[in-house]
Image: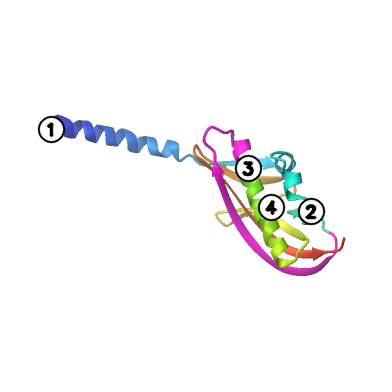
Amino acid sequence: MKNLILMLAAAAGMLSSAAPVLAADRVVMLPLAAAMADNDAKTRLGDSVRFYFGSQPTPALLDKLGSEKTSQKTNAFGKSDEKACNWAFLSAMLRLQKRAQDLGANAVTNIVSNYNNVEHSSPTEFECHAGAIMAGVALKGDFAKIAK
């Protein structure tokens, strides 16, 4: 009985020391252009809503319709960080697009990465957090009607 308890305690110790490895969270900065070229993103997003990242110049704003955050995750098991992150990015973009359409907006401006409410603004890249099992992308943007 004593040996069984010692073996169980040793096994529990080994498993608990492996848990941080399984929960690894890497910050990955990836190019927007590559994410938009992956997973048929351009076709899936269409052109009814235009997207402007960070400090990208926008056409004249006719009306501001609010802002919103989205945080999307995807299964990363067996996928490269880039592949998993691009899927999560597309999911986040589709959410922003849907909200823009619901509001009658034709643009999402000032899109920034917003993981754990920490903003990272860039016109060329987005932030993703990738682990052994999950990858996540959080975005924040402003909805607007712009001149065409």
What is the span of residues highlighted in magenta in the rendered image? 59-87
Measuring from the top left, give residue 111's x and y in whole percent.
70, 55
Circle 2 SS class: loop
Measuring from the top left, give residue 2's x and y in whole percent.
12, 32
Residue that carries the numbered disc 4 in the rendered image: 121
Circle 3 SS class: helix
Q: Tell me the distance, in whole angstroms, between the alpha carbons under discs 4 and 2.
A: 10 Å
Q: What residue is drawn where x is 72% and y is 41%?
A: 40
Whether residue 120 is visible, yes or no, is: no
Of labels 3 and 1, earlier in sequence is 1
Circle 4 SS class: loop
Identify which amino acid the numbered label 3 is placed on.
Trp
Mark 1 surroundings: few (<14), some (14-19) or many (≥20) residues within 10 A: few
> Is residue 13 covered in magenta?
no
Q: Tell me the distance, in whole angstroms, between the alpha carbons under discs 3 and 1.
A: 50 Å
Residue 4: image quadrant is top left
Of labels 1 and 2, earlier in sequence is 1
Whether residue 110 is visible, yes or no, is: yes
